[in-house]
Image: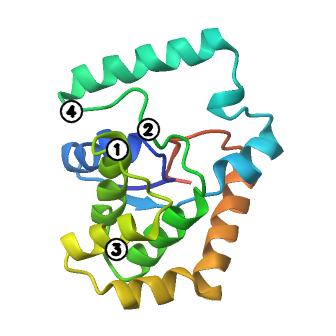
Amino acid sequence: MNDEGDIDFIRTYNGTKEISKKYSAQIIEKPIDLVGKVFVATGGTPVPQRHISRQNYRLLELKRWGEFLNIKINQKPKFFPPKDPHLPALFCLASIDMGINMDFSSKVLEHLWVKENDISNIDTLKLIADDLKISFEELSKLATSDKIKKIYEANTQEAINMNIFGVPSYVYNN
């Protein structure tokens, strides 16, 4: 089974690895520019701009998922939404390119949703790289490369072309 998905700043943390294990599925992370491009192309609304009823329901949903999956989730993390969601997405893409599948992105999301760290801060990304024993210098160089930026753009355009309007999204046998 080969599933393709995109990164989401909660769902990758709370269940993608479990889905992969349970169904023996290979899940391919594809970080995308959700707010800046996908929402614009598909009519989505960033969380802070949503009607209060939608924001409240989202908090209830986060609480339920945390309980269901028995994981810690801060429903209102201090640094959400990230000031610069592109930076951690590019670092996640670089880690994927280095063969570090889901570990880096899971840690990024743990820092956002549990540890109350700013994932837009380069020091947080370095801390994660150090924790995973990844060369931060190599990761940082790759994350800021044209190669990774082009992959980010291609992933985003692919998501739009496939009518993906939010995350998580999984495409099966396409």
Question: For mark 4, what is the residue?
Answer: 71
Residue 70 vertical placement versus 86 (above, below) = above
Residue under circle 1? 116
Dot 2 falls on a residue whose secondary structure is: loop
Q: How far apart are the alpha carbons under marks 2 and 3?
A: 19 Å
Q: CA distance from mark 3 to mark 1?
A: 16 Å
Question: x, y (%) of residue 84?
Answer: 60, 58
- Looking at marks 2 and 3 on the same chain, the residue that comes earlier in the sequence is marked by 2
What distance separates the C-alpha of mark 2 from that of mark 4? 18 Å
Task: Tell me which amino acid carries mark 3.
Answer: Lys
Say which label, 2 or 1, has the lower sequence index: 2
Is residue 26 visible in the rendered structure shown here? no
Disc 2 target residue = 78
- Which of the 4 image quadrants contains residue 136? bottom left
Amino acid type at image mark 1? Glu
In the image, residue 131 above or below residue 68 = below
Residue at screen point 28% across, 45% down:
115
Residue at the extreme top of the image, as rendered:
53
The residue that label 3 is drawn on is 126
**Within-10-Å neighbours for mark 1: few <14, some 14–19, many 20+:** some
Q: Position of residue 126 (x, y in %)?
A: 34, 74
Q: Which sits earlier in the primary sequence, circle 3 or circle 1?
A: 1
In the foreground, 113 or 10: 113
Residue 169: x %, y % from top left: 53, 43
C-alpha span from label 2 to label 1: 6 Å
In the image, taking residue 39 as reference, residue 59 lies left or right, namely left
